[in-house]
Image (cartoon, helix red, strand yellow):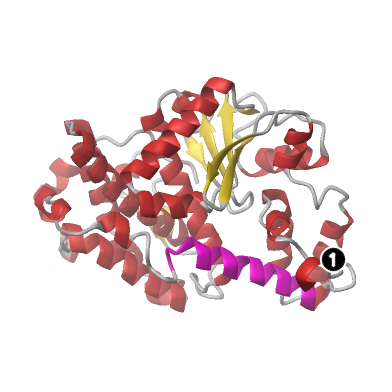
């Protein structure tokens, strides 16, 4: 989901005249929201989310396509580093969406097994030609895509997925290989993330496999999509400073965590369809080409804004500056507004896990901001 431009205070505060109702700096000293957002055993702990995801994929192969995916080391049909590769996960997710039609599901898994590059990774291909760059973390690596145009099957498939699901058009944007300077900025941004919110960002980074640079006249600031799981796309212009890049990475990694959670939890009701779902109208989007959002987009955005509020307030406490406080206030307002709007549709649109997720997110947010009077909220 594309991120917005750097957060600003806008006229929504004048319209609602309740800034101090939903945001109180004094509360910032009282509740460790960044820790609360990192430690929920179901909705936030990355090790559990990713383990459940991998076990689901391996079990899917065991049940539906055991002959096409013979067992390997440890009686596993697929290794974790292969299963969580973005292009492979795309195929596995396509199969999972067809689980109620076993022949169609098996056809997807058979096609995936027939791809000769399935046991390779983008990082391994780049290492073969001496291009590999990665951020090393305890038990995990986040790779930088250095040459998207590499003539390897996995790179070609990755390019095709970007064109299909995120690109604004052939002349609008393109995948750009990270430069040595940008690689340095990525490392500095990750250092800032870990210094600001060590528990939260250590977990969030585990949901990212690749950081991918995008360039072009119409390139988004940053984006991610369920169709390319594990990849955070960031515009070259947002990779100039560690501070701006860290914000973009927090934004997209929060999305990636929710995508991983959705794969194995009943976040949405079984019959939920984003094309026909109820919509809500964010106050700050009323003049945009898309003034109304379906519930799933609103929930994903609320999830991000709760995190960004906590991120910006901690950055403000660490380094000061009115701009950071203003960004925290903007994120607080938007989170409050969207959580309230989604709650009105929770019974019909969310599944059991989704309703629990919304309650938890709201509790974390309100523990810092206080509840917003419902009668003041726009639909």
> Can see residue 263?
no
- Seen at 40% across and 29% down, the residue is 242
The quarter of the image holding the C terminus is bottom left
Q: In the rendered image, is residue 181 in sight? A: yes
Residue 50 point in image, percent of width and height: 56, 63
- As drawn, 363 above or below 165: below
In the image, residue 341 lies at what x, y percent? 31, 62
How many labels were placed on the picture?
A: 1
Q: Is residue 152 left or right of residue 288?
A: right
Q: Residue at x 59, y 22 (%)?
A: 179
Q: Residue 71: image x %, image y %?
A: 83, 70
Residue holding disc 1: 107
Q: Relative to residue 284, is residue 33 depicted above or below?
A: below
Q: Is residue 203 left or right of residue 365?
A: right
Span highlighted in magenta in the image: 43-62
- Camera-nearest residue between 347 and 311: 311
Q: Residues within 10 Å of mark 1 (few under 14, many from 20)?
A: some
């Amino acid at each position: 989901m594309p991120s917005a431009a750097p957060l600003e205070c806008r006229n929504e505060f004048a319209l609602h005249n309740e800034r101090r109702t939903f945001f109180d700096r004094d509360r910032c000293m009282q509740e460790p929201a960044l820790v609360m957002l990192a430690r929920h055993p179901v909705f936030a702990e990355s090790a559990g989310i990713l383990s459940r995801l991998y076990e689901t994929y391996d079990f899917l192969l065991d049940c539906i396509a055991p002959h096409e995916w013979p067992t390997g080391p440890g009686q596993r049909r697929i290794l974790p580093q292969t299963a969580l590769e973005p292009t492979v996960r795309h195929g596995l997710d396509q199969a999972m969406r067809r689980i109620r039609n076993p022949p169609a599901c098996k056809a997807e898994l058979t096609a995936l097994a027939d791809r000769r590059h399935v046991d390779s990774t983008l990082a391994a291909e780049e290492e073969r030609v001496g291009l590999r760059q990665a951020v090393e973390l305890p038990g995990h690596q986040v790779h930088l895509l250095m040459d998207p145009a590499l003539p390897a099957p996995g790179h070609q498939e990755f390019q095709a997925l970007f064109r299909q699901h995120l690109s604004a058009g052939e002349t609008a944007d393109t995948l750009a290989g990270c430069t040595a300077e940008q690689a340095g900025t990525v490392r500095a941004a990750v250092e800032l993330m870990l210094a600001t919110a060590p528990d939260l960002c250590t977990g969030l980074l585990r949901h990212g496999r690749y950081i991918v640079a995008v360039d072009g006249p119409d390139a988004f600031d940053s984006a991610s999509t369920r169709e390319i799981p594990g990849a955070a796309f960031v515009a070259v212009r947002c990779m100039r400073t560690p501070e701006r890049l860290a914000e973009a990475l927090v934004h997209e990694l929060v999305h990636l965590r929710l995508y991983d959670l959705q794969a194995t939890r009943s976040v949405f009701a079984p019959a939920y369809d984003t094309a026909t779902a109820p919509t809500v109208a964010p106050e700050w989007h009323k003049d945009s080409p898309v003034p109304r959002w379906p519930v799933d987009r609103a929930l994903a955005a609320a999830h991000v804004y709760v995190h960004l509020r906590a991120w910006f307030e901690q950055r403000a406490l660490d380094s000061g500056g009115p701009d950071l406080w203003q960004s925290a206030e903007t994120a607080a307002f938007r989170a409050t507004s969207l959580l309230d709007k989604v709650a009105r549709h929770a019974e019909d649109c969310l599944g059991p896990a989704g309703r629990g997720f919304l309650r938890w997110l709201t509790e974390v947010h309100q523990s810092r901001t206080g509840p917003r009077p419902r009668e003041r909220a726009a639909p």
